[in-house]
Image (cartoon, coloured by chain):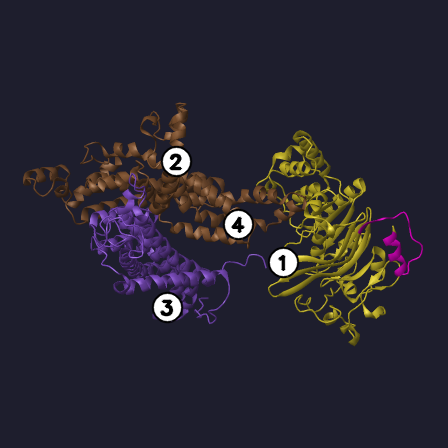
Chain colours: A yellow, B brown, C purple
Amino acid sequence: MEKASTRFLILGKGKVNNIAEDMLDVEDLRTYYYTRSGIVKAVDDVSFTMDKGETLGIVGESGCGKSTLGFSILKLIPPPGRIVGGRIVLDNSDLIAKSEKEMREIRGRRISMIFQDPMTSLNPLMKIGTHFVELLLTHDPLLSEEDALGRAKSILSVLGISPERIDDYPHQFSGGMRQRIMIGLAIALNPDLVIADEPTTALDVIVQAKILDLLKSLRDAYGMALILITHDLSIVLERCDKIIVMYAGQLMEQAERLDLQERPSHPYAQGLLRSIPNIELADQRLEAIPGDPPDLLNLPRGCRFQQRCPYAMEYCHKETPLIDVGHNHLVRCFLYGG
Amino acid sequence: MVSLRAYILTRLLLTIPMIFLLLSIVFVVLRVMPGDPIKALIGLKAPPDTVESLRRQFLLDQPLYIQYFDYLSDLFRGDLGISIYTAEPVINEIMLRFPATIELAISGTIVSVVVGVLMGAYSAHKHNTIADHSFRLFSMVIYAFFIPWFGMMLQMIFAVQLGWLPLYGRADIYLEPTHITGLYVLDSLLTLNFSSLINSIKHLILPSIVLGLVLSGIYIRLTRTHMMETLRQDFITAARARGLKETTVVYKHALKNAFIPVLTMMGLQFALLLAGAVLTETTFSWNGIGTFLLQGIQNRDYPIIQGIVVFYALLVAAVSLVVDLIYAYIDPRIRY
Amino acid sequence: MARLVRLPRRFLKKGGEWYLTYAGLAIITLIFAIFLLAPIIAPYDPIKTDVGERFTAPNFQFPMGTDLHGRDVYSRIIYGARTVMLVALASTIISLIAGVPIGLASGYAGGKADRVLSLVMDSIYSFPGLILAIALAAMLGPGVVNMSISIAVVYIPTYFRMIRGQVLSVKENLYIEAARAVGAKARTIVFNYIFPNVIPSILVLMSLNIADAILTEAGLSFLGLGISAPTADWGFDLQSGRPYFPGLPGRGSYWWLITFPGLMIIVTVLGFSLFGEGLNEILNPRQREGE
């Protein structure tokens, strides 16, 4: 694809790999919230690409914009928020240019979403069977109700839930099972991309692992791409092909998994890695990153991490560019040039 | 966790003193107030012994505590006394006219809830638009519409000018359905009398709209607030993320949640409904207990006045108890 | 935890609730003006019959027409404001004077007395207001004073409940402090903290109370249980005009007999409602709906 090859040349790539195609191409995405107290630049100039079947991890602390990024892809940003710039290209067409009606056809079917809190993401007054049937019938009106019900039941078994429970209500299930139902709804129509917004944050550790394993097995079976949004770096280091680190609305570092682990370049990413407890080290002192994230209404000029950065220089007052440090590894930091 | 049975018991136990209190207050008010009912009934020119004999007949010459005891024991047996005017048992007279009020109350509530919920839902859906502000304003303004005036205005337009609907009454004389329950619409259906059915419904329309609209304000605001809260929930965003149409999301997913508070509110509004019904009945010459009360007052018919007031008290207590119990049945968390 | 009330300095704030309050205030001022200036602005004596031909439609001389007795409707409307406002205000003040002290005492004392009083008040509160007023007015007889009393009884529980609620919540907060402080001080603290906090809520309650009282007064007069003829009163005029609005054969409807009294009721009730609701929004702003 043209776009992809141009991009690779600018960043000093070499030969273009024709086999891998960009399924999703996010360019210079900007999503702002126009509040009464000012403009919140929740997502500011973020770009990345995804191949078919790839797993992308988006990591950052609360308020860094990762969830907003996820919602932006589905164009589910509520007012006073708005996508103000950039492109989100899915298989050659820009989602931002699409109408609401066209987006509705994409949501749930080509791109779907898994939410953070399984307690509140299902309608408490609706049977889970109805959740599925409604979804299936919305996207395929010619489907009969019995067929839809049948498909719903088979999805439940794939998820490891007894199909007889199709007439049960959400509150009759545990948190982990509800999350599985959510996943089931997300993969029901075999989408190209699933966006998982903190899918395990509200669950305990054991259930967490099960859910992530479930996602992996579904991916192996259906071949969909996955965006895993989380604040837990250890999860993405384990399970994602590519990782993006976000801070205060900006993309600070992007690298493939092993590369990030071995050569974390951005001071923030380094700090994050250091703060992961290592079970094999005795007497490990956990290092937290000192300070707090900046007030998004009052951002510092230039690099948004300067106030907490151990390497901050005079330079950092200037707009920090993204620098390529080789092997698809990008860093937004003056330490590496610029 | 309190069992349902224990809850019912507690609730009943609390209702009883309240009812006693209400009945006692009624007794006190009616006995202690100035004005001699017997004299008013017969007139000042009656011979003193007729006045005295009637006095004795109604126990008005006995000391108050005996009257009180007599009053309570009669009530306990369901005896509300005899009407001075018609010499019929009060309870019978009341039951003759009660269905009319109930029919009006039910259809009024239907109008209130339907209008209220739809307006409230739309307001929440399109909040901060002109429609939203208009509906909110409407909810406040409509309560100020003095029921008799509102009724007369509608009568003027729809009955007099346009002639679409009847001016007053429950039905045209020869189209009254056979008496089974006393509810004309129901009786017409039960006897398959379709001309009667249409006639009764036509007569029901204007009074229901008047009563229903004036009391709809609270439902508009309640639904709006609750809907806006619901629309902020995750499962709504999740539904959108599955590609569902916005109207489906709002009017199917969110609206379902709004009905529970509406149900409770219906119980709380019952007293207001009864009060509004009195004015509605007067305006539309509707033969219910409201107009009957006024007749009783005009005729200085003590037992009728007392009987109706007691009846209202028991009715309100009963309805509030039922609503509480239904709510407890639905939601086991709410049990004192 | 009880905060002292600060008087808002910026009276020119924008926002829906301020518009409501100002609109209400404007109407209230207008009604009070009519109330006070009635003798000056009314062209005719409201109870004087045959100042004009009976049943004349609104014209230059009689801007609201004349009624069945040949009285000027416009003058009756103006003087009607006096009757209505008199009753509404009197009843509200009576409710206030009766309800607040009882609520205060009951909440503060607690115990059996409080429980009994609450039960009594709840019983009255749950009973349909208009019907209670009807029963009382029927027993007491017609007249402005009797009407005021009848209506007042209906609203006493409202003040009782509100004050009692405030007392209870403050009591709970100060219990710990009061336990340490000198016993007598507790009572003063309670009074000094409650009153400033409660005044704005009382104002809101009064405004809404007056609105309701006007409707109840109109209801009583409409049903013939209120003032005695020929006093000018909106509800009463509505009732007297009622047989004539469908129109006599060949004559058309005498709409002005009921349209003007009814509109006056609505406008006046609206004034107090909007003011009360607006004030309530200002004092207890609901959560911001969406940023």
Task: Report the Cα–Cα distance between label 2 and label 1.
Answer: 48 Å
Residue under mark 2: which chain is it in? B
Q: Amino acid at mark 2?
A: Leu
Residue C60 visible within the image: yes
Question: What residue sits right under mark 3 in the picture?
Answer: C186
Please tell me which of labels 2 and 4 falls first in the chain.
4
Badge 2 vs badge 4, beta-carbon distance below 8 Å:
no
Task: Return the x and y of residue B284 as percentages of the image width and height.
Answer: 33, 39
Badge 2 vs badge 1, beta-carbon distance below 8 Å:
no
Q: Residues within 10 Å of mark 2 (few under 14, many from 20)?
A: some
Q: Nearer the viewer, residue C87 or C168?
A: C87
The residue depicted at 62 percent of the width and 49 percent of the height is B234
Task: Return the x and y of residue B241 as percentages of the image width and height.
Answer: 67, 46
A197 left or right of B45 in image: right
Residue C153 visible within the image: no
1 and 4 marks on the same chain: no
Question: In the picture, residue C48 is in which quadrant?
Answer: bottom left
Foreground mark, 4 or 3, reads 4
Residue under mark 4: which chain is it in? B
Q: Which residues are magenta?
A: A2-24
2 and 3 marks on the same chain: no
